[in-house]
Amino acid sequence: MGSTAVAITAFYCTAVAAGLVAVAAVWWSTRAPGRIDVARVVEREKGWFAIVVALLLGLLLGTVFFIPYGRTSTGAQVVKVTGQQFAWIIQPATITANKPVEFRLTSKDVNHAFAVYDDRDVLLFQVQVMPGKEQRYVTTFRRPGVYHVLCLEYCGLDHHAMAADFRVTR
Ligand code: CUA
């Protein structure tokens, strides 16, 4: 099991345990219901609503600036990618490590998904590729080697054959 899988498993087990504790707490608190003070409940719900809104806003502000799409990087190596049934055209197919790369991706026919795996078959990122639109994705490869590309959007009978490689050099 890789470290990511261990982290996901640990997080999942913790979440399940926390969920069980929460269910037990609700069950315990409702064993012998007393009289309900509706006005107090209404006040309390306003408080919870404010907490939920604050949490969602925090989540939004904490993540929205990390969305990797729509960025451009001046001085980046530009790699043009064209998807078509059933192949990838990657130009140039050699990329320099430790220098930003700007992928510019489009499709000649239908939707595809440009998915890049490293030489250990770990998925690094995926970009939706659409006809009539140029998607941009900026990243930096740290390790030299051969990277693999697959299509992750079902696009026809030979979707599974839509594979390619590119090389990252020092
Ligand atoms: Cu292209 Cu699936």
Image (spheres, rainbow, N blue to C red):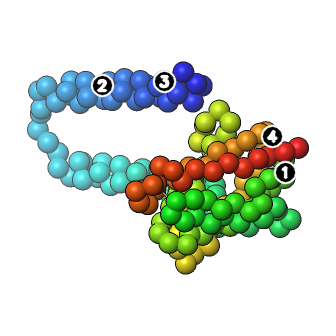
Work out whether 27 lies above or below 170: above
Q: Earlier in the sequence, mark 1 or mark 3?
A: 3
Report the mark closest to the observer, 2 or 3.
3
Q: Earlier in the sequence, mark 4 or mark 1?
A: 1
Cβ of mark 2 under 8 A from ligand 1: no
Would residue 109 appear left or right of 13 to someone viewing this image?
Answer: right
Question: What distance separates the C-alpha of mark 2 from that of mark 4?
Answer: 46 Å
Query: Which residue is found at the position 51% from the left and 50% from the top?
Result: 161
Q: Earlier in the sequence, mark 2 or mark 4?
A: 2
Q: Which mark is residue 144?
A: 4
Question: What distance separates the C-alpha of mark 1 from that of mark 3?
Answer: 36 Å
**Element on which disc 4 rests:** loop
Q: Earlier in the sequence, mark 2 or mark 3?
A: 3
Quadrant occupied by the N terminus? top right
Q: Earlier in the sequence, mark 3 or mark 4?
A: 3
Query: Which residue is found at the position 68% from the left and 36% from the top?
Result: 119
Image x and y of residue 111, in percent: 48, 66
Query: Which residue is found at the position 59% from the left and 42% from the top?
Result: 123
Query: Which residue is found at the position 69% from the left and 60% from the top?
Result: 90
Tally the numbered discs: 4
Image x and y of residue 142, in percent: 79, 42
Report the mark closest to the observer, 3 or 4.
4
Callout 3: few (<14), some (14-19), or many (20+) C-alpha neighbours within 10 Å?
few
**Mark 1, residue position:** 96
User: What's under tag 4, amino acid-wise?
Assistant: Pro
**Mark 2, residue position:** 20
Residues tagged 2 and 4 counted as in contact (Cβ below 8 A): no
Residues tagged 3 and 4 counted as in contact (Cβ below 8 A): no
**Mark 3, residue position:** 10
Q: As drawn, which residue projects farthest toward the right?
A: 170
Cβ of mark 3 under 8 A from ligand 1: no
